Image (cartoon, rainbow, N blue to C red):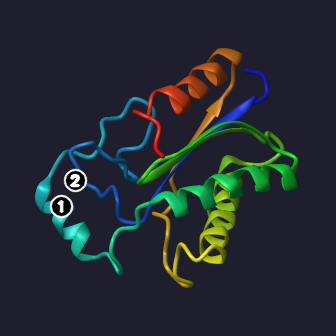
Amino acid sequence: MGHVLAYLITMRGYGTWLHGDERGSVDSGHRGYGSAPVATDKSLELMEASLLKTQPITFDRPRRTAIATSLFEVCQHKGWTLLASNVRTNHVHVVVAAAEVTPEFVMNTFKSWATRAMVASGALPHGTKAWSRHGSTRYLWTERSVHDACVYVLEGQGPPLP
């Protein structure tokens, strides 16, 4: 296989998708390629919700604006190519070409810059945990996978948000 062309990064707002959720989730035992997700379990989801330190964090218009601007700015600053992004009410998808670094580094950089931008704009109180731990980091090895990821991010997320 050649070199990675881009990454599909997905970051979720803190507390907005817990283990046991009907949408499925992954953990250390359920994250390998082709493995089944953690089973839907309302009691597990409620137990996880009880462990949250704050209310779940969603992204209203001011937060989405700050996040979207920060994605562009970090890519410009780092020399990465932002191929597609979509900031939703509880998650963010980004397709980015940044092959000289790991996708985990890219995701952590996006989270840091976005948090600072939300705080600086007054959309998020200082010290608030905005993001769930980790996220999804997918390697895109082919032009087709990059294209498909961009279509998914731009067209597969539901109607545009204001």
Residue situated in front as seen by the camera: 127 or 118: 118
Q: Which of 72 and 111 is in front in this view?
A: 72
Name the amino acid type tagged 1.
Leu
User: Which residue is label 2 attached to?
Assistant: 20
Q: Is mark 2 on a helix, strand or loop?
A: loop
Q: In this view, does 41 lie above or below 131?
A: above
Point out the tag, 2 or 1, that comes first from the N-terminus: 2
Circle 1 — which element? Answer: helix
| 109 relative to 41 in the view: left or right | right
Specify whether 61 is left or right of 41: right
Tag 2: amino acid? Gly
Name the side, left or right, on which 66 lies relative to 48. Answer: right
The residue carrying pointer 2 sits among few (fewer than 14), some (14 to 19) or many (20 or more) residues within 10 Å by Cα, namely many
Q: Residue at the location (55% across, 30% down)?
A: 154
Q: Which image quadrant for residue 145?
A: top right
Q: Residue 4 or 115: which is nearer the viewer? A: 115
**Camera-side residue of 17 and 33:** 17
Q: Assess disc 1: are there few (<14), some (14-19) or many (≥20) residues with their C-alpha within 10 Å of its C-alpha.
A: some
- Which residue is drawn at the image coordinates 79% and 28% (left, top)? 3
Instruction: Check if mark 2's residue and mark 1's residue have beta carbons within 8 Å.
Output: yes
Q: Which mark is residue 132?
A: none
Identified at 77% across, 56% down, the residue is 74
Residue 161, compared with residue 11, is above or below; it is above
Q: Where is residue 143 in the image (x, y as percent from the top left)?
A: 71, 17
> Which quadrant does the N terminus fall into?
top right
Q: In which quarter of the image is residue 73?
A: bottom right
Q: How far apart are marks 2 and 1 (CA)?
A: 5 Å
Give percent across and percent down for residue 83: 71, 33
In the picture, the disc for residue 44 is: 1
Q: Give the vertical position of 134 relative to 101 (above or below).
A: below
